[in-house]
Image (cartoon, coloured by chain):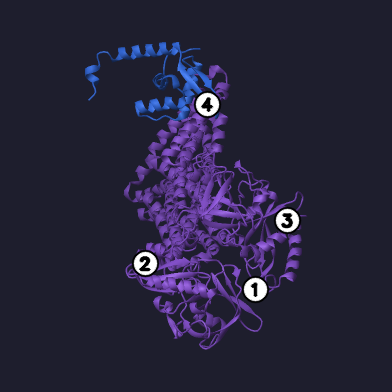
Chain colours: A purple, B blue
C-alpha cells in the first residue's frame, strides 16, 4: 500500500464542500501539507490530520455555502450568516456551561474517546487478521482457491505440482489455473537478514489474478516453460518503492537473488502483496527455473507426494463453484485409481479437492476457525466498551438536559422557538462527541501503530498491514456521535416543551417519573456491561497467570538453537548425518561452547515440535500420526529430560544396531494403558516431514525408555516419540549448543560458524532456547495487558457513569428524604434508604453482567489455559470492585443528609 | 461590494501574502503567518478568508496549471487592498502614539 497517498475518502469529502474555482488548488495545497506532515510526524498522524480537515472545512465552507444560499438580508454581521452566528453562539454557550460543570465534559470526552479508540483498534486488527478483502485483483468473484483435502487430516492442504497440472487441464470450467508457493531468498550483497520473500508462480499468474503490472509486462509464455524457465522477476510495488526508490528505469535492469541474476520485467500494481495475509512479498518469479528456486526443485515438481502449491483458478464466465467442485471430484476419483501411493484412504494421503472463493483464502480456513473465537471475544469486549461509553454520555447528557429544564423554560417564555431550543441543547452533544471523537482518533492511531510494531512470537518475514481502517473509524465515530445526539436529543425535545409553570418554580415536570425510570434502566445497563467487561478481563488475566505455570519438560537454560539443512538437495542419509555430526564436532571444539547435541527438530519450540511425524500401527488395522524427534546420544541428559524408567538414547544406538525409541508417558497411556511400556515394540508404517511424505521403509522400534510429559496448563499432552539421530535419515537438524556463558552469547557464533543462509533462519533464527519457549506466551502477555487495560478502562468508565446516574437518582430523592427528616425521620435511616436505592441498581446490573461474562468466557474457553469461566478471583474481584464503586457513588450525595440541615436542602430547590 | 474595515485575521493574511511575494499561494501564506506570529491556523480558516478577501476585491487570484498534477491558485493584493492596509496601519500607528513608554517591550 502506498502509505503517503492522501486518504481518498477524506479528500473527496473535503472536495465536495469546496467551491468549484478553489477545489483543485486547495486539494493540491492540502496534499502538500499532508506530505510534509507525513515526513515529519509519520503517516498515521498525517492521515489523522487530514481527516480532521473534514470537519474543519465543513464548519467554515459548509456553513458559508448554506448561508450564502439564503437571502443576503439575512446577513447581520460582516460575512457571517445568521445560522453560523447562532451556531457560534450555541457553541460558546455550551463551552461556558461545560466549563462550569467539568465532570460532565470529562466523563463524556474520556468515555467517548476510549470507546471509539477501543473499538476502532480491535476492529482494525480483526479485519487485518480475519479480512476477506481479496486485494486488488480483477473480477474476484470468478477467482477460487483450490486445496487438497487429506484423508483424516487437513481439509485445506497444499497441492503437488503434478496434481496441479491435472487440475489445470480442466479447461471446461477454468479459464486459467495458476499455482503459487512461497520462497525465501536473499538479496545478494545484503546481510543475512536481508531476505526477499517471493512467490514462485506459474507463468499465467497475473492472468489468473486479472492484474497487469503498472510498469513493464507480466511473464511471457516463452519465459515460463517449466524446467527451462528464464530468471525473470516481477517486483512488487512495495519492493520497487522501498528497495529501488521507485526507479522508473527499473525494467530490464538486473537484481541478484541467492546469487542468481534475475532480469526485472515488471512492477506489480500497488496493494498486490501476496496471497497469504500479512505476507508482504517482494516479487514474483516463475516456477521451473533450471536448478530450482528455494525448495521448488525438479524433484518437488515431479513428485506427487510433495504438496507445496496453492492453486488459484479463474472460472470461465458462467461457470459456478459447484460445477468446479464436481469436475474436481471426478478428477480426484481418477487420481485415486491411478496413484495409490499418494491418493487413497490411508491417513495422510490425498483424498480430494476443496474449493473456496478467493475472499476466503487470505488466511487458511483451518487457522481462521482458531482465530475467530478470540477475535469475537475481543470484538464483543470492544463493543461493550463503546456501549458503556455511549451509555455514560447518554446518562450525563440527559442529567444535564434535565438540570437545564429551568433555563429552557425561561428561554421559551421569552419567545425562543422550539427548533432554536433543540439546537441549543444538541450543541452540547455535538461538541462533546466531536472532541471525544477527535481524541479517540488519535488514541486509536497510536494503539494500532503500537500493536503493529509489537514483536511477533516467531521470526518470520511477516508484516501486518495495520494502518487504521477508515471505514471502521467512521462507523465507530458515527455510533458514538449518533448515540450522543440521541441521548442529547431525547431530553432536549422533552426539555424544549416543558410545563413552564412547575419548571419555573424549580419543580419537576410531570414527565419526571418516566425519565427517572429511563435513568435507572441506563444505570442497570451500564453496570451490567461493566461487570461483564471487568469479569472477562479478570478471566483473561488469570488465564495468562495460569500459562506461566508451564513446564516445557526440558531445561533450556544456556542452550542456543540453530536450524541447519544439508548442503545439497537429495543428499544420501548417511552423508547428511555425517555432515551434521561433523558440524557438531567442530562447534563443540570452540571455547565458547560447552556441549552440543543434535536433534531432528526442537521439542519445546511450538513452530517445530510437531514438524516431523511417524505413522504408527495402533491396533489391528488402525494407524495414527505421532510427532517424533530423533536425537543424538547425550541430548536427553543435556536438556535434563526426566526419565521415568529405562534408559535414554545412547551411543550404542547406531546405524546397524537394533532401532530403538524412547516415548513419553502420554504415549504409554494411549497405546499400552496399564503397562509400563518398556520392552514394547512400535511399528512405524510411514514418515513425514512438514507436510511431505518421506520415501522411507517401515521399521520396528524397541521401546527402551519412558520420559515424563511436558506440562502445559489446560492442554492435554500429546504422545511423542524419540528415535536415535544415528539411526534416523536426517533431512535437517536443529543444533542444540550449551554455552559456557549465556545462550545469547552463542547466537553470533552460530551465525558465523554454521554459515546460515536466509532460508535456514526462517523457521528458527539462532536464538536462546529460553526466549523461544517464552515467545509462545508472548502473545498471552500482550493480550493480558490489553485485557487488563480494557478492564481498567471499563471499570473507570463504569464507575464514572454509575456515579453520574446513581448520584442523580439519589439527588432526586434528596428532597423527599429531607422532608422525611424534617418531619422526624432519623438521618441514619434516610441515608441508609438512599444508599440502598443505589445498591439495588448496582446489584441488578452485577447479576445480569455475570451471566453475560459467563457466556463470553465460553466463547474463549480454549484460550483460558484451564482457568474455569467461574474463576472465583476474576468473578469475585469484578463484583467487589463494582459494588464498591456503586457504593461510593451512592454514598457521596447521601452523606449530605448527615452533614447538612434538611431545611438547607429544601431551600436550595 | 468592497468593504472598508479589516478583521485581525484578514489583516494577517493580507500581510502574509505580501511577505510571500510573487509565489503566494495557500501553503506559503500559512507558513508566513506561522513563522512570524508563532500561531497555527486551520487551513480551512485561511482559505475561507482568502475567498472572502477576493470577493471583497482586496486580492485577486490566478490559476496556474502545471505540466502534471493539480493546479495552484496564486494570489496577490490589489490596489484597493494595499490602500486599505495603509489606512489600517495609519489608524493603528496613531492609536499607538504616545504609548511607547507604557508598553515598551521588556
At label 4, counting other C-alpha atoms closer than 10 Å, the crowd grade (few under 14, some 14-19, many 20 or more) is: many
Badges 2 and 4, same chain: yes
Q: Which one is earlier in the sequence, the residue at label 1 or at label 2?
A: 1
**Residue A743 numbered mark, or none:** 2
Q: CA distance from mark 3 to mark 2?
A: 53 Å
A190 to A552, vertically: above or below: above
- Nearest the camera: A551 or A252? A252
Whether residue A79 appears in this view of the structure is no
At label 2, counting other C-alpha atoms closer than 10 Å, the crowd grade (few under 14, some 14-19, many 20 or more) is: many
Q: CA distance from mark 3 to mark 4?
A: 49 Å
Q: Which one is earlier in the sequence, the residue at label 2 or at label 4?
A: 4
Which residue lies under the disc numbered 3? A321
Q: CA distance from mark 1 to mark 3?
A: 27 Å
**Residue B56 numbered mark, or none:** none
Q: Residue at x 39, y 63 (%)?
A: A747
Q: Residue at x 33, y 68 (%)?
A: A592
Mark 2–mark 4 CB contact (< 8 Å) = no
Q: Secondary structure at mark 2?
A: helix
**Residue A837: image location, x then y, percent:** 45, 54
Amino acid at each position: 500500500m502506498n502509505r503517503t497517498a492522501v486518504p481518498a475518502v477524506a479528500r473527496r469529502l473535503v472536495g465536495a464542500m469546496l467551491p468549484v474555482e478553489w477545489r483543485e488548488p486547495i486539494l493540491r495545497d492540502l496534499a502538500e501539507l499532508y506530505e510534509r506532515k507525513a515526513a515529519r510526524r509519520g503517516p498515521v498522524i498525517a492521515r489523522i490530520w487530514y481527516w480532521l480537515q473534514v470537519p474543519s472545512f465543513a464548519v467554515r465552507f459548509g456553513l458559508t455555502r448554506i448561508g450564502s444560499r439564503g437571502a443576503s438580508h439575512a446577513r447581520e454581521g460582516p460575512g457571517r450568516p445568521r445560522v453560523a452566528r447562532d451556531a457560534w453562539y450555541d457553541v460558546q454557550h455550551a463551552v461556558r456551561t461545560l466549563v462550569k460543570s467539568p465532570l460532565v465534559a470529562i466523563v463524556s470526552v474520556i468515555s467517548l474517546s476510549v470507546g471509539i479508540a477501543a473499538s476502532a483498534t480491535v476492529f482494525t486488527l480483526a479485519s487485518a487478521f480475519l479480512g476477506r478483502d481479496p486485494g486488488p485483483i480483477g473480477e474476484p468473484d470468478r477467482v477460487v482457491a483450490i486445496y487438497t483435502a487429506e484423508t483424516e487430516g487437513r481439509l485445506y492442504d497444499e497441492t503437488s505440482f503434478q496434481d496441479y497440472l491435472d487440475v489445470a487441464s480442466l479447461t471446461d470450467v477454468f479459464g486459467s489455473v495458476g499455482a503459487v508457493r512461497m520462497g525465501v531468498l536473499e538479496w545478494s550483497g545484503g546481510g543475512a537478514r536481508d531476505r526477499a520473500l517471493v512467490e514462485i508462480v506459474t507463468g499465467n499468474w497475473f492472468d489468473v489474478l486479472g492484474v497487469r503490472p503498472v510498469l513493464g509486462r507480466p511473464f511471457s509464455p516463452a519465459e515460463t516453460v517449466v524446467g527451462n524457465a528464464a530468471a525473470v522477476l516481477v517486483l512488487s510495488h512495495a519492493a520497487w518503492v522501498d528497495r529501488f526508490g521507485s526507479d522508473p528505469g527499473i525494467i530490464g535492469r538486473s537484481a541478484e537473488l541467492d546469487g542468481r541474476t534475475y532480469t526485472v520485467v515488471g512492477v506489480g500494481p500497488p496493494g498486490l502483496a501476496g496471497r497469504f495475509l500479512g505476507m508482504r512479498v517482494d516479487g514474483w518469479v516463475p516456477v521451473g527455473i533450471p536448478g530450482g528456486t528455494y525448495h521448488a526443485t525438479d524433484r518437488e515438481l515431479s513428485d506427487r507426494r510433495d504438496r507445496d502449491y496453492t492453486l488459484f483458478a479463474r472460472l470461465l464466465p458462467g461457470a459456478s463453484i459447484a460445477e468446479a467442485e464436481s469436475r474436481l471430484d471426478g478428477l480426484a476419483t481418477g487420481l485415486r485409481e491411478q496413484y495409490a501411493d499418494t491418493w487413497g484412504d490411508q491417513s495422510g494421503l490425498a483424498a480430494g479437492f476443496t474449493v473456496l472463493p478467493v475472499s476466503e483464502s487470505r488466511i487458511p480456513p483451518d487457522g481462521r476457525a482458531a482465530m475467530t473465537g478470540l477475535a469475537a471475544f475481543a470484538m464483543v469486549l470492544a463493543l461493550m466498551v463503546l456501549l458503556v461509553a455511549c451509555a455514560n454520555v447518554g446518562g450525563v447528557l440527559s442529567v444535564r438536559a434535565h438540570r437545564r429544564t429551568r433555563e429552557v423554560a425561561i428561554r421559551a417564555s421569552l419567545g425562543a422557538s422550539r427548533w432554536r431550543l433543540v439546537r441549543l441543547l444538541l450543541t452540547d452533544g455535538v461538541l462533546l462527541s466531536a472532541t471525544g471523537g477527535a481524541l479517540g482518533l488519535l488514541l486509536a492511531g497510536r494503539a494500532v501503530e503500537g500493536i503493529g510494531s509489537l514483536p511477533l512470537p516467531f521470526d518470520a518475514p511477516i508484516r501486518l498491514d495495520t494502518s487504521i481502517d477508515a471505514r471502521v473509524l467512521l462507523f465507530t465515530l458515527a455510533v458514538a456521535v449518533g448515540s450522543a445526539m440521541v441521548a442529547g436529543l431525547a431530553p432536549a425535545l422533552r426539555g424544549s416543551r416543558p410545563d413552564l409553570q412547575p419548571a419555573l418554580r424549580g419543580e419537576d415536570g410531570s414527565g419526571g417519573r418516566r425519565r427517572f425510570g429511563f435513568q435507572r434502566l441506563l444505570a442497570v445497563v451500564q453496570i451490567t456491561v461493566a461487570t461483564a467487561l471487568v469479569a472477562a478481563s479478570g478471566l483473561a488475566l488469570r488465564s495468562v497467570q495460569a500459562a506461566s505455570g508451564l513446564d516445557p519438560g526440558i531445561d533450556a537454560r544456556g542452550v542456543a538453537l540453530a536450524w541447519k539443512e544439508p548442503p545439497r538437495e537429495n543428499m544420501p542419509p548417511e552423508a547428511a548425518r555425517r555432515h551434521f555430526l561433523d558440524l557438531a564436532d567442530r562447534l563443540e571444539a570452540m571455547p565458547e561452547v560447552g556441549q552440543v547435541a543434535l536433534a531432528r527438530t526442537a521439542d519445546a519450540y511450538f513452530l517445530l515440535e510437531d514438524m516431523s511425524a511417524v505413522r504408527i500401527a495402533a491396533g489391528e488395522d488402525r494407524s495414527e500420526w505421532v510427532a517424533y524427534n530423533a536425537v543424538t546420544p547425550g541430548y536427553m541428559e543435556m536438556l535434563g529430560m526426566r526419565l521415568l524408567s529405562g534408559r535414554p538414547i545412547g551411543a550404542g544406538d547406531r546405524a546397524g544396531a537394533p532401532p530403538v525409541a524412547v516415548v513419553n508417558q502420554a504415549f504409554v497411556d494411549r497405546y499400552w494403558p496399564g503397562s509400563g511400556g518398556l520392552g514394547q515394540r512400535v511399528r512405524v508404517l510411514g514418515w513425514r516431514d512438514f507436510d511431505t511424505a518421506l520415501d522411507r521403509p517401515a521399521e520396528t522400534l524397541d521401546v527402551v525408555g519412558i520420559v515424563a510429559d511436558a506440562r502445559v496448563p489446560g492442554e492435554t499432552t500429546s504422545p511423542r516419540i524419540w528415535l536415535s539421530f544415528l539411526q534416523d535419515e536426517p533431512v535437517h537438524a536443529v543444533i542444540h549448543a550449551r554455552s559456557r556463558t549465556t545462550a545469547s552469547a552463542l547466537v553470533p557464533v552460530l551465525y558465523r560458524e554454521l554459515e546460515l543462509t536466509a532460508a535456514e533462519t526462517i523457521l528458527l533464527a539462532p536464538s536462546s532456547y529460553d526466549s523461544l519457549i517464552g515467545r509462545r506466551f508472548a502473545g498471552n502477555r500482550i493480550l493480558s495487558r490489553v485485557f487488563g487495560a480494557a478492564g481498567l478502562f471499563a471499570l473507570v468508565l463504569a464507575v464514572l457513569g454509575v456515579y453520574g446516574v446513581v448520584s442523580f437518582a439519589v439527588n432526586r430523592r434528596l428532597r423527599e428524604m429531607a422532608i422525611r427528616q424534617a418531619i422526624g425521620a432519623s438521618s441514619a435511616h434516610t441515608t441508609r434508604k438512599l444508599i440502598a436505592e443505589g445498591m439495588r441498581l448496582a446489584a441488578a446490573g452485577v447479576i445480569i453482567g455475570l451471566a453475560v461474562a459467563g457466556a463470553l468466557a465460553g466463547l474463549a474457553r480454549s484460550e483460558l489455559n484451564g482457568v474455569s469461566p467461574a474463576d472465583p478471583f476474576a468473578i469475585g474481584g469484578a463484583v467487589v470492585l463494582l459494588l464498591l464503586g456503586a457504593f461510593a457513588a451512592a454514598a457521596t450525595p447521601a452523606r449530605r443528609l448527615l452533614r447538612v440541615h434538611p431545611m438547607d436542602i429544601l431551600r436550595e430547590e | 461590494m468592497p468593504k472598508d474595515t479589516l478583521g485581525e485575521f484578514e489583516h494577517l493574511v493580507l500581510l502574509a501574502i505580501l511577505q510571500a511575494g510573487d509565489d503566494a499561494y495557500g501553503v506559503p501564506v500559512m507558513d508566513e503567518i506561522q513563522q512570524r506570529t508563532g500561531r497555527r491556523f486551520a487551513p480551512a480558516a485561511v482559505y475561507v478568508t482568502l475567498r472572502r478577501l477576493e470577493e471583497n476585491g482586496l486580492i485577486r487570484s490566478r490559476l496556474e496549471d502545471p505540466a502534471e498534477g493539480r493546479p495552484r491558485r496564486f494570489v496577490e493584493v490589489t490596489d484597493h487592498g494595499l490602500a486599505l492596509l495603509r489606512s489600517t496601519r495609519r489608524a493603528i500607528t496613531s492609536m499607538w502614539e504616545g504609548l511607547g513608554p507604557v508598553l515598551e517591550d521588556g
